[in-house]
Image (cartoon, helix red, strand yellow):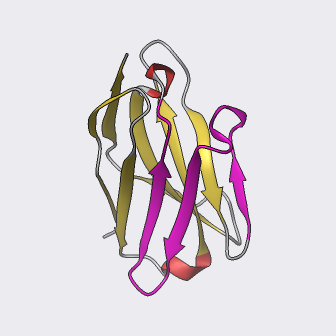
Amino acid sequence: QVQLVESGGGLVQAGGSLRLSCAVSGISFSNYDMGWYRQAPGKQRELVAAVSSSNTNYGDSVKGRFTISRDNAKNAVYLQMNSLEPEDTAVYYCNARWRYNSLYYYWGQGTQVTVSS
């Protein structure tokens, strides 16, 4: 059974930091590209950051503030979020996508991040 379990969300003031974690089980983690997405109320889900075996990719609105990383030994992916803004308020989802066929992917249940002004 595939499980992606996010943690680390919460309430933080603008300018603060949070670190999200996603613990993954049930898949061959190193063969998956990992990503963080977010969805704010009334908006579409959007890519925040992604990491493959060697590359990272960021949404324009978070470049320079967020950092994605992965630990293949721990089957985990992280999102360090600095200089948080109220516009970062959303539910953050972890995503695992098989590197060899993008039709195979999995989602976590999401974790709420709320940034107060």
- Relative to 41, say whether 6 is above or below: below
Going by the image, does 19 lie left or right of 61?
left
Q: Position of residue 73 (x, y in %)?
A: 44, 87
Quarter of the image containing the C terminus? top left
Please, which residue is most extreme toward the top here? 42
Q: Which residue is drawn at 67% across and 45% down?
A: 64
Residue 75 in the magenta stretch? The answer is yes
Please, which residue is most extreme toward the bottom here? 73
Going by the image, does 15 lie left or right of 68?
left
Q: Residue at x 66, y 31 (%)?
A: 61
Going by the image, does 82 lie left or right of 22?
right
* Numbered label tally: 0
Q: Position of residue 37 (x, y in %)?
A: 52, 42
Quarter of the image containing the N terminus? bottom left
Q: Which residue is drawn at 37% across and 69% down?
A: 24
Q: Position of residue 102 (x, y in %)?
A: 67, 59
Going by the image, does 55 lie left or right of 88?
right
- In front here: 3 or 112? 112
